[in-house]
Image: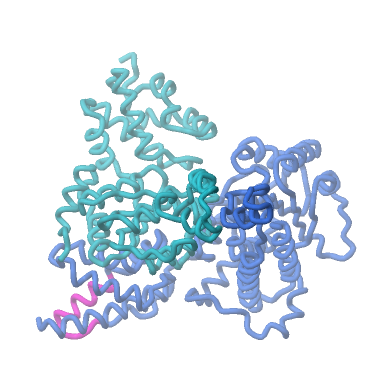
Chain colours: A cyan, B blue
Amino acid sequence: MLKTDISRFHNLLEQQHYIADESIATALFLAEALRKPLLVEGPAGVGKTEIAKVLASALDTDLIRLQCYEGLDVHSAMYEWDYQRQLLHLKLDEGSGKTTEERSASIFGEEFLFKRPLLQAITHDRAPVLLIDELDRADEEFESFLLELLSEWQITIPEIGTIKAGHQPYTVITSNRTRDLSDAVRRRCLYLWIDYPDFDKELAIVKGKVKGIEEGLASEICRFMELVREQKLEKTPGVAETLDWARALAALHHHHLDAAIIEQTLGLVFKNWTDTQQVKESLADFLERLGVRSKFS
Amino acid sequence: MDDLGHHGELSANMVGFGRLLRKHGVKVGPGEEHDALRALNLIDLSLAESFRHSIRTTLAKSKTEQEIFDQYFDSYWNVWDRAMEMNRPGTEEESRDTPGREKSGKHSTPGLQHWLSGNSDTSGEQEAAGYSPLLVKTRRDFQAFEKDELQEVVRIIRALGKRLASRLSRRRVPSSKPRTIDLRRTLRLGMRHGGEWMELAHKKRRTQKLNLVLLCDVSRSMDLYNQFLLLFLLAFQRAFHRMETFVFSTSLHRVTETLQSNNIEEVLTRLSEEIPVWSGGTRIGASLDSFVETYGPAVLDRNTVVMIMSDGWDTGEVDRLESALKEIRKRSRSIIWLNPLMGSPDYQPETRGMKAALPYLDILAPVHNIESLRRLGRELINLQR
């Protein structure tokens, strides 16, 4: 039977400050129940990776993470031979009188194998949560290999043979949508879209993660972020940036936002010169809409 | 309610809902419908939103599909609910044609999207049937087509783009840059020298895909050509690792995000909304300059091909154009300039803009008909070697 019912997901999500997020809880629940991979898409910095952590926590199992990047090839994701040890072993074996065949065979044991995330996930002692992070950064070739893995759940190492998964991992795939993933991957997975949080959600997250922050400041920060996200920016800031900013402002013991403070700390929120300029120009407008107290009142 | 009866009707209605979604561009297949039904078996349906969330996560596989799902969910399932009460299976929402996608948009082009949404078969691609009678069409200038023929042209272009892109993946050749050591081969090679390793064998590495940067002149004269080029590139973009798209007239705008959708109609609609109609000619130099400054560091590298689509009518300063091109050339793999005017046999690059640009271009090509798009595709494939 299922390890969890949906309420367990609700509780865990709440701990991560995803308030009343029925869609996420349902998706996680079905990922477990239907044993299908879950594709989580959304802008950068909204907490997609956290979803995988919640799943691992709910299922009381380990999280194995594969970080994708441009140029990631199938091998580095699966395994790599420890060449140095192998060569050393062979050198030491030299005088032993073994044939080349025997020597070759002796260096392809598990002790010479670096297990990378995918192989780790397959050979784990219980079903882990396999997080394939930012799949959009890898290429199509990798995607098709991944698809095969997601159906067959086995890996072939030429020197050793085929290794089948002892326990099928629960898979979470995330994408920042810098490129469109193939249809084949999409249809294979359950789908979840995570957007920037609305004011209430973000406020809950800030209050939860920045201990001791004042209600007033937190509200102003979230309201500001709401306004910022209405703009068309090159790199719209995510929740991570909100939290960085909130922590900094709290640490500096500010109680309210004003023009000077914002200008000084813009770099924490905007990671792009064009965006910073654009916000600076609209600052007066923002502040007005924010109803921010001027520091002279 | 009799359980079996209920389930029987639920399945039937899931199929009906699937059909409705497919009609509006969501690729729902029997696999997805099956998943949705399985999900409903497991979920506690007394929770109001559970029903919607569970079938949404199993049927809608992208943000766009979710939006379409949301649009039709309520009306469909409420009808069903009411019908259940009246003890009859619900009827699916009959052909309610795609609600007014014809936003007037700021760019009032006759619009490829108009033809696309008018007679769309958004369900799946149809390969261009009977190619040979159309051979004549491949040489005809886009502007020379009748409105009713454009539908066909669109289909051909999309098929062409996809075909070429897949040809590319089969052709990729291992690069000579050394990578990981191939131990087995090293050992074998060592045998030649009595067991000593004189040479290391390396595993060959597949080539990396190139990136594409597209800069489109969207002044009035460029309309139709731009659209067909975009159509082609959208179908062809799998051949690239990343495609960044910009439009310019008197200034430059990045539209890459707008192009990120498999749905052509949507892309063209959104583009026409986003691109304001500029009057007063094109300042190519200033736009390219601004591109280099603002986006250069982020998108220009040795693996990037820059494609500029413009007829070269420049009302700005020519030196800026030259210096921008020089900079781009330095930092990227090659520059391709596409000029629809080149379609005419007696064209000479006479405009100041074109003349100034010429020395910096690797390829200057026409883009006025299907044949030119095909050649462009092949050229792009060759660049990947």
Residue B86 within the segment the image draws in magenta = yes
Residue shown at 32% from the left, 31% from the top: A221
> Could you say where residue B41 lies in the image, as x and y percent from the top left?
19, 72
Question: Considering only vertical position in the picture, is B185 above or below B97?
Answer: above
The foreground one among B372 and B384 is B384
Identify the image quadrant of residue B53.
bottom left
Q: Quadrant of the C terminus of chain B?
A: bottom right
Question: Considering only vertical position in the picture, is A296 above or below B176?
Answer: above
> Could you say where residue A267 lies in the image, as x and y percent from the top left?
45, 27
Main SS category, magenta section: helix
Q: Quadrant of the N terminus of chain B?
A: bottom left
In magenta, the rendered stretch is B75-90
> Could you say where residue A172 lies in the image, as x and y percent from the top left?
34, 56
In the picture provided, is B157 more to the left or to the right than A162? right
Residue A25 within the segment the image draws in magenta = no
Residue shown at 72% from the left, 65% from the top: B378
Residue shown at 54% from the left, 34% from the top: A274
The foreground one among A192 and A214 is A192
Identify the image quadrant of residue B127.
bottom right
In the picture provided, is B223 more to the left or to the right than B47? right
The mark tally for this picture is: 0
> Could you say where residue A251 lies in the image, as x and y percent from the top left?
30, 20
The foreground one among A176 and A273 is A176
The foreground one among A18 and B137 is A18
User: Of all residues shown, which one is farthest toward the top?
Assistant: A296
User: Of all residues shown, which one is farthest toward the left?
Assistant: B1
Q: Is residue B209 visible?
A: no
Question: Considering only vertical position in the picture, is B126 above or below B242?
Answer: below
Q: Is residue A43 visible?
A: yes
